[in-house]
Amino acid sequence: MGATLVVLIALGVLGTWLLTHATSVNSRLVDRSTPALIAGVRLDAALVSQETGVRGYGMTGRTEFLEPYRLGIRAQDDAVRELRRLLAADGDPTPTLDTLLERAGTWRRTYADTVVATPPGAPVAFATERAGVGKSAFDALRAASGALQDHLTTSRLQARSDLIRVRTQRNWTFGAIAAVILAVALLMFVGLRRAVSSPLGRLADDAERVAAGDFDHAIRSSGPADIQALAATVELMRSRLVDALDASEQARRRIDAQAEDLRRSNTDLEQFAYVASHDLQEPLRKVVSFCQLLQRRYTGQLDDRADQYIGFVIDGATRMQKLIQDLLAFSRVGRGDEPMRAVELDRVYGGAADSLDLAAREAGARLTRDPLPAVTGNAAQLEMLLTNLLGNAIKFRHPDRAPTVHVGADRDGDLWRITVTDNGIGIEPQYADRVFVIFQRLHARDEYPGTGIGLAMCKKIVEYHGGRIGIDDQYSDGTRMWFTLPAT
C-alpha cells in the first residue's frame, strides 16, 4: 500500500507537470506565435498601403490618395506595438523588426515624406524623378518585412512542433500512467485476495462446518491481525458453545433420568390408585357395613359409651372412604384418558347444577349464570371443576343470608375468564394461595365437612387445560373465584 501510494504520487506529479507544460506550449502557439504572425501580416499590409498611397499621390497630385498612406501609418504603429508586446512576452529579440522599422524610416525620409509634402493639384515631379530611389528603398523595406514574416512563421511552426511533441509525450505518459494504475490495481487485487479474501474464505468455511454440526472443528487463524482477531473471537464463541452443549447434554441426561424416575413413580402412583380404589375400599365398605349392622342391632342394648364408640367408627370409616375416593379422583386428573375437544360450558354448568340441586334446595341457594362460551377441554373434568366451585359457594354460605351464586364469562385474548361469585363468608387475602394446596383447611371439620382436596383438584384441572385459577382479592362481599380456559 505504501509503495502504491508513492507510485501514484509520482505519477500525479508527472501528469501535473505534463499538463502544465502542454498548457504553456499551447498558450505560446495560440496566444503569442499566431497573433504575432497575424500582426506581421497586418504590418506588411500597412506598408503596402503607404506605398500605394504615395505612388498614387505622386502620379496625380490628388489628396484622396493620401488617405491610404495615413491609415497605413496608423495600422503600422498598431501592428508594431502588438508585435513588440508579443515578442517581449515570448522572450524573442526584435532585431528583424528593428531593421524593418529602420528601413521604413529611410524610405519615408528619402522619398515618401517629400512626395507627401508637395502641394496637391498636379503630379509631383519629384516622384517621377526619384522613382528609382523610392523603389529601391521600398524594395529593401519589403525585403525586411519578408524577413520578419519568415521569422514569425518559423517561430509559429516551432511552437506548433513543440505542441505536437508535448501532446505526444502527454498521450504516452498518460497511457503509461493508466497501464501502471491497472497493474497496481491488479497487484492490489491479488494482494487483497491473498491477504484478506483467502483468510476470510477459510474463516467462512470453518464457520460453516461448525454451523453444520461439526462443533469439534477448530477455527483456523490466518491473514491480517484484524481477521486473526475475528477468527479468535469466533473460536472462543465455538468453544463456549461446545461447553454449553456439553452442559446441556449432561442436563438432558439428568432430565431423562429424572423423567424415567417420574415415569416409575407415576406407575407406582397408578398402582396405588388401583389399590386405593379396590383393595382399600372393599375392607372399608365391610367395616362400615358391619358397624352399621352393629349399630342397628345393638343400639340400646349396650351402654351409651358403646353406642358412641360405634358412631365414631362409622364416621371415621365413612370419612376415610370419602378421602380415598377424592384422592382417586385427584390422581386421575390430567391422565389424558380422553382427547381435548370443544366443550359447551352451558351444558357443563347444567350437569354441575343438577348434581347440586338437592344441596342448593336445602340451603335455599339461588344459582345464576351468564351465557357461557365454548372452550377446549375435557367435559367430565370441567364439570368436576364447576361442581367443586359451586359446591364450595353453597357450603361456605353466610349464616345471615341465603346464598346466591353467579357464574360469568369474559373474553381475554385467546382465553375465556370464568368467574364464580358468591355472597358467602369469603376468604381472607393471606389465605388466597393456601386454599389451593391439598389437605389445607381453613375451618374445623365439625364446622364445614370436607377432605381439603376440592380446590387443589380445581387447580390441577385448570392447569391441565393450560389456564390459571385464583381468588379476586378486590371483591369483598363474599368470594369470587376466577379461572381461565382456552377458547375454541
Image: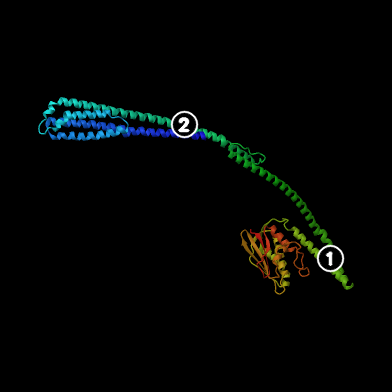
Q: Name the residue at the bottom extreme.
A: 400
Secondary structure beneath disc 1? helix
Residue type, label 2: Ala
Q: Position of residue 99 (x, y in %)?
A: 24, 28
Alpha carbon distance from label 2 to label 1: 113 Å
Q: Locate residue 406: give its quadrant.
A: bottom right
Residue at x-position 26% and y-position 34%: 81
Seen at 68% across and 44% down, the residue is 243
- Do the residues under discs 2 and 1 have CB atoms within 8 angstroms? no
Q: Which circle marks residue 329 in the picture?
A: none
Q: Is residue 56 visible?
A: no
Image coordinates of residue 305 in percent, x first then y, are 87, 71
Way the structure is coloured = rainbow
Q: 10 Å neighbourhood of mark 1: few (<14), some, or many (≥20)?
A: some
User: In the rendering, which numbered label is found on residue 288?
Assistant: 1
Q: Between residue 300 and residue 232, name the one nearer to us.
A: 232
Q: Hey, which quadrant is residue 451 in on the image?
A: bottom right
Which one is in front in this view, the residue at disc 2 or the one at disc 1? 2
Position of residue 3 relative to residue 339, above or below, is above
Crowding around mark 2 (Cα neighbors within 10 Å: few <14, some 14 to 19, many 20+) is few
Residue 49 horizontal/vertical position (percent):
19, 32
Q: Position of residue 101 (x, y in %)?
A: 23, 30
**Residue identified by numbered label 2:** 179
Q: Quadrant of the C terminus?
A: bottom right
Q: Given the image, on which type of amino acid does mark 1 rest?
A: Val
User: Which of marks 1 and 2 precedes in the sequence?
Assistant: 2
